[in-house]
């Protein structure tokens, strides 16, 4: 009885700090609910309605079910027979892949070099700073710089013109190869440094005793990389690829600035987000824009799941699960 009375007194006299944790995180949840969750719900709801403006007249919301989704998969642009949404999705993925493949290959190579105890590269801090610096520059500023350098009056065009490779009237931004290549190049330059730092952190988290044991057993650098480094780096690599994929699907500012918002040439640099921005232009077609946004979300989720499953199978976790093994 005395012990129970003492416990009751301690509870009454003590101060509970648990509630303060909830109070401190409450502003985040309120902000997220108002500015993120509610707009997402409204976007999904608007995707089932026809709502747009004609001049100053606003067409009241009219429920049409999956009509907006059907339009996105049936309407085409120009002479193309490909549905608009699929055409722009293809543009987005092509430009992302062109930038992502060299981004991850070079980032992985640099990460292995910088963390290799045998090489012991000097001045790593300087190199890390240099490769990360492009990520600190705003994408719009980077795009304007590239446009200034490669436009018909820029230095690169003048060099190509003097070498008789292009004519004076030729515009590099009206070439599909150059336009997509420049968009991919900017994305590569901006993000390979960040990816390198992330992969370096993953490699540095691997137990050094594994590398030492492999070297003692006579394994060369190639075997160490493919048998130890890469398998144990898969979780971090999966995270980096998925975040890069989501960022690529949401690509907007770089192609918008380089093409002046027109997606030149012939909409080959128009991305999914640029398409949604056009729908929210003068006509303010909220219904179709909402349907396109929902499809972008589904597209991102499905591709992320595919990438996750692919890398997990490479890591061997799925095989262990099938055999009934437990990861420790």
Image (spheres, rainbow, N blue to C red):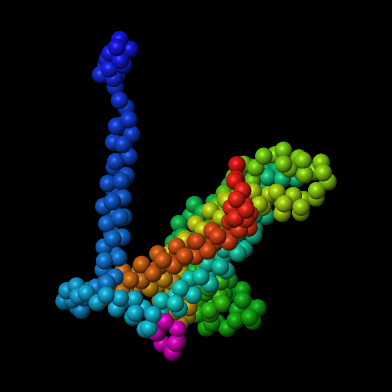
**Residue at position x 31%, y 36% from top?**
22
Q: Residue 37, located in which quarter of the rendered image? A: bottom left
Q: Looking at the picture, how far across and down is residue 254, in whole percent? A: 46, 66
Residue at the outermost front position:
1
**In the displayed structure, would residue 203 be above or below residue 177?**
above
Q: Compared to 135, does 91 lie above or below?
A: below
Question: Which residue is nearer to you in this view: 316 or 187?
Answer: 316
Mostly what secondary structure, the magenta segment? loop
**Quadrant of the rendered structure where residue 289 is?**
bottom left
Residue 177 visible: yes
User: In the image, 164: left or right of 214?
Assistant: left
Quarter the C terminus occupies: top right
Q: Where's residue 315, x and y in %?
A: 63, 54
Looking at the image, residue 158 sits to the left or right of residue 280; the answer is right
Position of the N terminus, as image quadrant, is top left
102 within the magenta span? no
Query: Would you say residue 80 sits in the magenta stretch?
Result: yes
Front position in the image: 284 or 29: 29
Vertical placement of 220 versus 288: above or below?
above
Q: Is residue 291 above or below residue 30?
A: below
In the rendered structure, the answer to whether residue 134 lies left or right of residue 267 reads right
Residue extending farthest to the bottom is 79
For the point 54% across and 58% down, which residue is it? Answer: 308
Q: Is residue 24 left or right of residue 190?
A: left
Tell which of 290 and 254 is nearer to you.
290
Q: Residue furthest right?
A: 218
Give me the residue at 30% from left, 65% from top: 44
Residues shaded magenta: 76-83
């Amino acid at each position: 009885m005395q012990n129970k009375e003492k416990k009751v007194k301690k509870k009454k006299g003590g101060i509970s700090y648990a509630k303060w944790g909830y109070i401190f995180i409450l502003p985040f949840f309120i902000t997220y609910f108002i500015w993120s969750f509610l707009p997402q719900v409204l976007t999904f709801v608007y995707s089932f309605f026809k709502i747009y403006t004609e001049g100053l007249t606003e067409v009241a919301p009219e429920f049409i079910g999956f009509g907006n989704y059907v339009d996105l998969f049936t309407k085409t642009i120009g002479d193309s027979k490909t549905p608009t949404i699929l055409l722009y999705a293809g543009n987005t993925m092509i430009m992302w892949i062109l930038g992502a493949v060299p981004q991850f290959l070079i980032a992985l190579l640099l990460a292995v070099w910088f963390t290799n105890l045998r090489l012991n590269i000097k001045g790593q801090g300087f190199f890390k700073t240099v490769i990360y610096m492009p990520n600190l520059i705003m994408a719009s500023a980077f795009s304007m710089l590239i446009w200034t350098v490669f436009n018909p009056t820029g230095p690169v065009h003048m060099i190509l013109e003097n070498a008789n490779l292009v004519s004076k009237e030729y515009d590099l931004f009206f070439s599909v190869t150059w336009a997509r290549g420049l968009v991919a190049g900017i994305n590569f330059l901006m993000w390979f440094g960040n990816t390198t730092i992330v992969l370096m952190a993953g490699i540095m988290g691997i137990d050094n005793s594994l590398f030492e044991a492999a070297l003692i057993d006579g394994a060369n650098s190639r075997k160490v990389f493919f048998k130890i480094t890469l398998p144990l780096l898969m979780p971090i690599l999966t995270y980096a690829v998925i975040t890069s994929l989501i960022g690529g699907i949401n690509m907007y500012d770089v192609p918008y600035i380089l093409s002046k918002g027109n997606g030149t040439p012939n909409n080959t640099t128009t991305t999914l987000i640029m398409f949604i921005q056009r729908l929210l232009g003068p006509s303010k077609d909220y219904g179709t824009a909402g349907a396109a946004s929902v499809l972008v979300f589904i597209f991102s989720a499905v591709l992320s799941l595919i990438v996750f499953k692919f890398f997990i199978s490479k890591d061997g976790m799925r095989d262990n699960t099938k055999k009934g093994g437990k990861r420790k």
